[in-house]
Structure formats: structure tokens, C-alpha cells
Amino acid sequence: MTSYKELGLVNTREMFKKAVAGGYAIPAFNFNTLEQMQAIVQAAVETKSPVIMQVSKGARNYANGTILRYMAQGAVEYAKELGCENPQIVLHLDHGDSFELCKDCIDNGFSSVMFDGSALPYEENIRITKQVVEYAHAHDVTVEAELGVLAGVEDEVQAEESHYTKPEEVIDFATRSGCDSLAISIGTSHGAYKFTPEQCTRDPKTGKLVPPPLAFDILHEIEKKLPGFPIVLHGSSSVPQDEVDTINAHGGKLPDAVGIPEEQLREASKSAVCKINIDSDSRLAMTAAIRKHFDEKPGDFDPRQYLKPARENMKKMYIHKIVEVLGSNDKL
Ligand code: G3H
Ligand code: 13P
Ligand code: ZN
């Protein structure tokens, strides 16, 4: 058993309380590689932001759970080395799909876990979330749960409302499961293709796709039902058009990739939404820099030559999110 406290990590409890009260959101960046970890820590230290470093089941399979855990410990030490006296870093399991996986993470240094039972029947979701909560709380680990199913790109947004979180369920769900935060579905979705072109309108000036707005009415109803309760948004990458254009200009093929407009995330950050998940934007920033590098310098083959600009580009993106979108800067 390795407690996250031995690694210098923190759980989300205080962080979320301050974020909800302060009208900002904590960035939750997914990581799988050294360069992502370095960029996240550099960005968080330079902006004086708390940060959630999150690991999916796929990331654990790719990079190895033990390595990722020590990377998180390394992140804390690295932040101190960069001059941050009191880094606030959470190691979080993203989309845990079983009690056993959540327990394994808690036993191995995670300070926060998500049990994602959103695809399960309601009672089953509550039952397993509660089981995770009981084990997690015994170790002072916080638990994110999910209610409502995130949209898939194939769904019709208008017919999507049945998948949105039902505000009338949230009090019962949060009370009976005991979760510390709740991920909700209000129109975001995972990946770089969040909406089909048919679901969007086109900006007549630029010809770019303009996605439909998030369901802020549902968010506000949920806030009224659970005042001050921490709410989480998954699938919140903005899919920056300049990165998509760079990728496509250098041999990539990402036609009609579209994300959540930043002004909507800015608005959400001011509400009870206190954790915003971003993965795809990091993937795009990394890929754009690497593709450009190879196009311009086809003779390079030392990974440091192309991973360095990739790391710089991700760091720039993380800083932008923290300062210009989520507002979590200067909170340490
Ligand atoms: O929500 C999913 C995250 O973007 C992680 O994706 O399962 O491919 O690591 P992944
Ligand atoms: P994006 O694919 O929009 O980055 O969402 C990431 C996410 O929700 C991770 O849990
Ligand atoms: Zn997610």
C-alpha cells in the first residue's frame, strides 16, 4: 500500500471547495508520456495553478501504472525544484470502470479516482460508486462519479436530451452514492470530432464549423439542486483550429474536427463546474508540432529534436487553458 500522502500529492476536497467559491475550474490534463508530464508541471508552476494529472485505464496499460505513479511523485518534486513551495497536484484515475481498478489505484498512490458507471443502470451505478466511496474515504481519497451519458458524434444533438444528466436525479444520486464530485452530460463529448458538420452551423465569414451551445439550462438546474457541489465536465477540449490546420498542412488528415468553444468553457468555469477535462487538445498540440518538425527537418531522427517542440507547444496550450479559459492561475 502506498498512500498518495507519501508522494506529496493532495486529494481534490479543498481544491474543489476553493474553486467553486472562487468561480474558477481546476484543469484536469490527461497524461501518458514524460513530455506531457513535464509540460503540465511547468505550466502549473509558471501560472501558480493547482492541477489534476489524470490517467486513464488505457494510459496505465500503455505506460505502466507503476511508472505513472512515480511520474506523479516526480511531478511534485519537479514542481518544487522549479520554485513552487507548495505544489497542489492530484493524481486521478480517469474513467475507472470497476471497483477493483479504483481500489488498485487507491492502493498505489492515487489521491482521487473516478468510477464511471454512467453506462450502467441507475441503481447499479449508485451501488458501485458507493462501494468505491467507502473504500476511498477510508484512505482519504476523493471520488468522482458520473451521471448521464456523454454524446457520441453519431447522435443527433437535438434528440440528445435523453442522454443529458437529469437534474431530478442528482440529489438522490449524490446523497446515496456519497461521491465528492459529479461529472454531468450537457453536450460535451470525447475526442476531436465532437459534432458532425450537420449538427453545426457555418460561420459565413470563415467557413468554419460553429457547434451548438452546451445545455447551460441543465447545468444551472443541477447547481440549484446541489448548491456548492463540485461538478465536472468531461470532453472539454476546444480542438484549436490552428493546430488542426497545422496537422492538415503537414500530411495529417483531420477533416472537420470540432470542439467546445472556449467562451462556453470560460462561462462554465465560473459556475459550480470546478474540474474541466482536457486530453485531445494535448494530443493535437503534440501531433501538430511533431508533424511540422518532420516536414521541415526530414533528416532529424533524435526524438529530443521533435519532442522538444512538441513539449513547448503543449506547455503553451496548458498555460493558455489555465490563464485564459479556466482562471485557475495565481491560486497557490
Ligand atoms: O476520456 C478519455 C480520455 O481522453 C482518455 O483517453 O482512454 O484513450 O487514454 P484514452
Ligand atoms: P477531450 O477528448 O475533449 O479532451 O476529453 C477528455 C476527457 O474527458 C478525459 O476524461
Ligand atoms: Zn472523460
Image (spheres, rainbow, N blue to C red):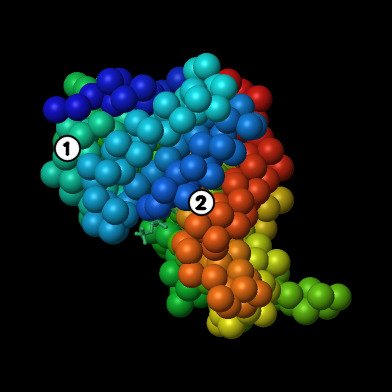
Residue at the spot of label 2 = 278
Q: Are marks 1 and 2 in contact (CB under 8 Å)?
A: no
Q: x, y percentage for residue 148?
A: 39, 54
Instruction: Tell me: residue 28, above or below residue 134.
Output: below
Q: Residues within 10 Å of mark 2 (few under 14, many from 20)?
A: many
Q: x, y percentage for residue 167?
A: 45, 45
Residue sitting at 66 percent across and 74 percent down? 296
Q: Looking at the image, which residue sits at the far top?
A: 85
Q: Kindly indicate the quadrant of the structure image that contains residue 21.
A: top right
* Type of amino acid at the residue the image marks with label 2: Ile
Q: Looking at the image, which residue sits at the far right?
A: 205
Does residue 127 appear in the picture of this structure?
no
Disc 2 is placed on an element classified as strand
Q: Kindly indicate the quadrant of the structure image that contains residue 273.
A: top right
Residue sitting at 42 percent across and 40 percent down? 53
112 vs 45, left or right, is left
Q: x, y percentage for residue 121?
A: 23, 55
Which numbered circle lies on residue 306?
none
Residue sitting at 63 percent across and 32 percent down? 46
Residue at the spot of label 1 = 103
254 vs 130, left or right, is right
Q: x, y percentage for residue 172?
A: 33, 36
Say if disc 2 is inside 8 Å of ligand 2: yes
Residue sitting at 86 percent across and 75 percent down? 205
Say if disc 1 is inside 8 Å of ligand 1: no
Name the N-terminal-most of marks 1 and 2.
Answer: 1
- Quarter in which the N terminus is drawn: top left
Does residue 80 appear in the picture of this structure?
yes
